[in-house]
Structure formats: C-alpha cells, structure tokens
Image (tube, rainbow, N blue to C red):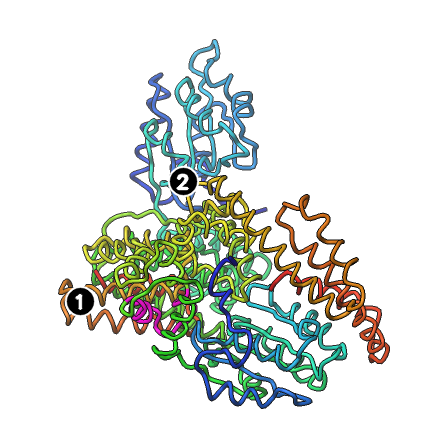
Amino acid sequence: MLWTDKYRPKNLKEILGNNKEKKIIQDWVNNWKAGNPQQPLLLVGPPGIGKTTFAQAIAKEFSEYIELNASDKRSQDVIKSTIGESSSSRSLFGDDYKLIIMDEVDGIHGTNDRGGVRAIGEIIKTSKHPLILIANDFYSKRLQSIKPKCQVIKMAKIRGPTINKMLKNIAEKEGIEYDKEALKELSKKANGDIRSAINTFQAIADTSHELTMEDVETVTTKDDRSTIIDGVMATLKSKNPRHVKDALRVDEDPTLVMEYIAENVAREYTNKNELKKAYENLSNADLYFGRAQSTRNYGYWKYATDFMGIGVSSSKRETYKKFTPIKGPTVFTLMGRNRGKRNLRDGIAEKMSEKMHISNTVAISMFPYLEIMFQNDELAWEISDFLDLDKDEIKRFRKKVIPKSVIKKMEKQKEEMRIEERDRRAEELQNQMFAGIPQEIEEEPVRDEPELISPEPETEKSAIEEELISPEEESEELMIEEMVEEEVEEKPKEKKNKQASLFDF
Amino acid sequence: MSGPWVEKYRPQSLDDIVGQEHIINRLKKYVGEESMPNLMFTGPAGVGKTTTALALVKSILGEYWRQNFLELNASDARGIDTVRNDIKNFCRLKPVGAPFRIIFLDEVDNMTKDAQHALRREMEMYTKTASFILSCNYSSKIIDPIQSRCAIFRFAPLKGEEVIERLKYICNEESFDYDEKGIETIVYYAEGDMRKAVNILQATASEGEHITEDSVYDVVSKSKPQDISDMITKALTGDFMGSRKLLHETMVLQGTSGEDMVSQIYQEVSRRVLDGKMDPDFYIDVIEAIANCDFRIREGSNPRIQLEALLTKFL
C-alpha cells in the first residue's frame, strides 16, 4: 500500500500545518452545515502539498461527494451530465449536501475540453451544493473567469521541518531505522512537495527498513522533479546560489532554459542596472553554449549554466516583492504566428539562390533593395520574370499588382528578344553544321513564331540545343564506356545536369 | 532586360573580374593543367568569391563545364547526407571532356562540424578525379583538417576605385546618367561589397534617370528599416520591452541576420554621434558593446540573445 494513502490525514484535525487555511475551511464547512450557502472554494498551490488531502478531509464532513479529476474527459457535456444535474437540484430531505470536488481545474485542455471552463462557470452559478475547485497555477488563463466567483485559498509549499515531522512519524510506525541528517536532507530536497518526500522515502526504506545519507543522495538526485518554470523562478526569485543551481538541474535543453530566463528577466528586474548585469551574464552564458556547440566540448555547459543561473540571480540587489508569472519565450510565438510570412520569404530566397548563386541569407539581405526596385513597374516585371515569382511573392515587394498594360508590353519585348536570340542561334547553327542547306533550317522555327506568345523560351531553345549537342553526346557515350564504375547511373545524371544548365544562365 | 544587375553583370571570365589581381593571376596558372589543388576562398561578402570560382571553373573545364561541375550553395540542405551522397555520386564518375571535375561549396562556414568532417573524408577519397573549391566568410569557422587540405586565398574588400570603375561601366551599358558624387556615395555605403554597390545602383536607377548624391542617399535610407532607429530610441528612453519587441519583429519577420542588425545598429548610433545627438563618451561605451556583440555573433553565439544584451547597454 502506498504510504501516501496509508498516512493521508483522515480529517482536518490530522492535517499538519496550514492553520490559517484550516480555520477558513472549517468556517466554510460549518456555514454550509448551518444551511448557509457559501462561495465555492478554490485551492491553489504547487503539486504535492495536500490540496487533494484537504478536499478529501472536507468530504468527510459531508454525507456524500463526487470527484472529477484531470483524467476525466471534461467537455461541457461530461461535466453537465455527471454533476450538472445533481448540482442544481437538492434532495427532498433537506440538509443532505453533496460535496463536488473538481481537481486540476487549470489543466482543462483548450481544445479537447471545449467549453469546459464555461461549464464550470455555469455550475458555480447554479450550484446549490458545496463546491471545491483545485488548481496548480494561480495565474492560469483558465482560472481568470473562475477566480472572482470563488473564495481563493492559496496554499504554500510545505516547509522542510513539517515534512520532516511527518516522515519521522511514518518511520516510527513502519519501524524504520533512520539517520536523522538523512531524513532532514530528504525533507529539504523534496522542495515543499510532501507527496514526493513520502514516495521517495517509501522507495528507499519500504523493504530495507533503514535510511542512510547515501540512500538520499542516490535517490533524490535521480528523481529530480524541478521543471523549467521552477528553474526560472528560482533564478529570478532567489539569491541563494545552491538553491538556484539545484533548481536549474532541469531535464531540458539548457539553451531553452536560457531563452526562458531571458524572456522573463526583463519582466522581473525593473532596475536598469540589474537588468544590464543580468543580460551580461546571459550573453556570457550564450557565448559558452555557442562554444560548446562549435567545439563539441560540452564541458563548457557548466560555465554557461552558472552564468545564466547564479550570475543572473545575483545581478539583483534584493528580491523583488512581486509576483511575475513566468512566460514562454514570446519570440517563439512570434515565429509560429508568422510562419506564413516566413515561408513566403524563404520561398523567394530559395528562388533567388538558385538563379543567382547566393545563399538564402544573402538573398534576404537584398530584399530592401528589391522593395525599391519593385516600385518601378517594368523592373518589377523583369525581376519577377527572371526569378519566376508568383503573385503572392510579388506582393511581398509591392502592394499594387503590376499593371496589365506593362505586363503586355514587357512580354512582347521579351518575345521579340527571344526571336532575335533564336534567329541568331539558328544562324550560328546553320554556319556550323548545315552550311550546305540553309533554307530548310530557317523555315522550321519561323513558322511557329506567331503562336508562341507564352514566355517559355527555354523549351524552344533546348530543342535547338539538343540538335546542337547531339553529335557531341555520341562522343560522350564513347567515353562513358571507359568509365570505372556504374555507367548506368551515369547517363541519366549527365542528362539531368545538362537540362538544368540550360535554365540557369 | 534580365532582372537583377548583380547577376546580369557578373563577370564571366577571369579577365573580367574586378580587383583581386594577385589571386586571379595565380589562379590562371591552373588553367590547362591536369590537376588543381583544393582551393578555399575566404573573405567578406560581395568581393567576388563565387564569381571567381565560376569563372575559374569555366576556363578550366571549357566547353563541358556544366557536365563536370557541381555547385552546392548554402541553401541546399547540406547535412552529412548531402555531403555523403551528392558529392560521392558526383565524384565517383570520371570527368568527361575535361581533365577533372570541380565541386563548388559555398559558405562552408555555415556547415555543421559533423558535415565538415564528412566533407574532409570525401576530399581525401577523390583527389584523382575531382577538385574542391570552398568559399566561406570566416576561415576560422572551418575545421583545421579541411583548411590544411586547401590552398587558401584571402579575398580583400574591393578598393573604392575598383567599384567606381565597375559602376560606371554598368551605367554606360544601361545608358544611365550619373555624376561622380553619386557614384562615390554608393561606394561609401557599399564598404567594398560589390553586390551591395550594384544593388544600390540598380535601386537608385529604378527610381529615376539620374544617379546623384541625393538620389543615392534617398535609396540608402529607404533600404534601412526604420525599426532600427525606433528600437534604439526606445532602449535609450528606458523602454526595454518595447525595444526588444522591435528587435524580435525585425529579426523574425524581415529575417534580418544578426550580423546585419549589428552593422545597422552601428550605423545608426554613429550617425547620432556625428549629428551631435549622442554623448561621445556614451558612444564609445556603446561601441565597445557593439564590437563585442559582433565578435560573439561571428563566433557562433545566438544572435538574438547577444542583441538583447546589447540593447540593455542603451538603457
């Protein structure tokens, strides 16, 4: 049996600490019992500090209770059908209140539990029964509409000594021999989470019936429960190097943790000089992350982590007396929101890089000049024709579409140039290879001239070039036979290369 | 009638290339030889690395240059797989109608170290059939084993008069009017980068007939995002969050690279100090920070974090 269940306080009196909260809750229960309806209770606080225990202890005070937790699918319908009915009607026999407990309210999923938050709102409004809501994150968006309608009880982390007392109690009942210091260390490392402390304790001592310092060291370092948010929180809020360093032992990409710290430090540190100092440290952290990456010497990470953790945390003279909710890096959301624009940009850059022997970065650095050039109708057409840009891509550089008259004019010009060029080539061809019979060759291309208005000169050109090249291809084939390996692969590849080459001049 | 002038006026032969004489002269010696060492062209943007490589390839491989030439630029996916497959497939074949085959890899400094190591092996394996030309901005970002397998050519920024000569040539070809002052202004802003010079020239030409100091200045200021100035003003007035937001938008939406951001911030603050709008002592402190930021970004740090840190210096 899990010790967390076995030793879970059965009623309010058995619960350790939290005296102020206990008082409020006891009053709340008494009022209900006196037939005096109260606002719902909202218990908020980090995991493992006894919110559910509280709720269940309260449940003991009522004759019946219903519980819903995060594992239930909480769409509007589910909430309504399971407790919606019973919440608004009361038993004929009067004083039988049913307690409704909704756990992890802030965990309601945005799309999967559509309408879930609204449904809770409705239940709060219509409920004739006592209602307890439980949540982890006081600042969660999903709580915003619920908070004003509830009596909020913020629960803090459990202090080390309190946890220690609880563990001692368990140790005595289970007959476990323990090293006092080890038990203290275990209580401290739980970081306010009494459930994790008890679970860890059970994992170590359930069978061996003893607890040593060594046990604590091996187990707790493995079972590290801090999250990125804890790490950022500690960095911003604490000035204790050990605390910060421990909290930053997070199972995440450290450069992501750095992004989080950078995002939030500017919200927390309002003093300019402190912000400057903090950013100096972040910049150093980044430097060493970069060096680790480029040299593949990940030993540099430890310096980087110290810069972004201890460095940033000690950049403040004193801890700010305020609570700033930790946000994810806004630049990521910005990137996500503008994926379309960025794809458009990269698509254009791709086309430029193909035709102009430049990288995407260089291509993008040319955009400001292209924007200016595109204000000129004819040049806009020329460049978009050269790069083969589509309508949306042209729009990236100019707001107005290119006037039809300009397009017509330019296409005509291009066609004329194409014919000129082709005639010149035809002449060359004639001189080179068909010196004796000029007439037949000249007739051929001239004939389809009026029909071909579409700007597709390449196909035409390549047809001519094919003729030009074909005799040489024969000689190529001769050479191919001399090749060392894989002639079969060679041939199509050669052809492909040639094809591509016709386009990019 | 052929789109961007940077491409239209790209020199096609070694003789047409502007500047870099001693490099060109040495390269010419490889023409007509049976083999060529692996080459590495290093230098800032717009000084002719790619142009030289393409011209060299054409004169060495002659008529069949397209068949014997593989160009992989930085936008092609160039992970280890590309290096292993594309290069391997290309190198395995015997040259056709040319003494050897040539592979041109652009911006090698942007390849991952792992890909560079893979490349190094390919370079060793096919010495008989193929030569490599690598180009990069910073040779320091190339792993040593590759550097030691290459003859390294350092391209210097182009001299003012070299750029002037080319710009005048283009103006004459396109029959555009210009005055000396106008061309000089372009050269001043181009900082030895021919691509930039030609882009400014074409952008200016697209606006009217004349290339004058004013029309060039107009284009240069238009091509700079106004956001940079706002961003600095916001930071100077203590609005770090607003300033940082503009930084993110410029980098994410316009895709401005970290190095461009640094150089534009530099231009902006130096304009301010020259106009008497910034205290020289403060300016020098800021310059130190900008220089540091520039160095770190080039060394491979995360440009966004470094630029955010730079912005705090204005507070």
Q: Is residue A100 left or right of residue B176?
A: right
Q: Secondary structure at mark 2?
A: helix
Q: Evaluate whether residue A161 shows in this view.
A: no
User: Which residue sits at x=47%, y=24%?
Assistant: A119
| Depth check, front residue: A169 or B296 | B296
Question: What is the CA distance from the residue labelled 2 to the residue labelled 1?
Answer: 71 Å
Q: Evaluate whether residue B105 shows in this view.
A: yes
Residue annotated with mark 2: A14
Query: Do marks 2 and 1 both belong to one polypeptide chain?
Result: no
Chain ID at mark 1? B
Mark 2 and 1 residues: CB-CB less than 8 Å, in contact?
A: no
User: Which residue sits at x=22%, y=65%?
Assistant: B271
Q: Secondary structure at mark 1?
A: helix
Residue B185, position as x, y percentages in the image:
29, 68
Q: Is residue A481 left or right of residue A202?
A: right
User: Which residue sits at x=20%, y=55%?
Assistant: B238
Tell me if mark 2 has few (under 14), some (14-19) or many (20+) residues whose alpha carbon lies within 10 angstroms of its own: few
Magenta region: B182-198
| Depth check, front residue: B12 or A95 | B12
Residue B284, position as x, y percentages in the image:
20, 73
Chain ID at mark 2? A
- Position of the C terminus of chain A by quadrant: bottom right
Tell me if mark 1 has few (under 14), some (14-19) or many (20+) residues whose alpha carbon lies within 10 angstroms of its own: some
Residue annotated with mark 1: B273
Q: Is residue B278 left or right of residue B92?
A: left
| Depth check, front residue: B50 or A276 | B50
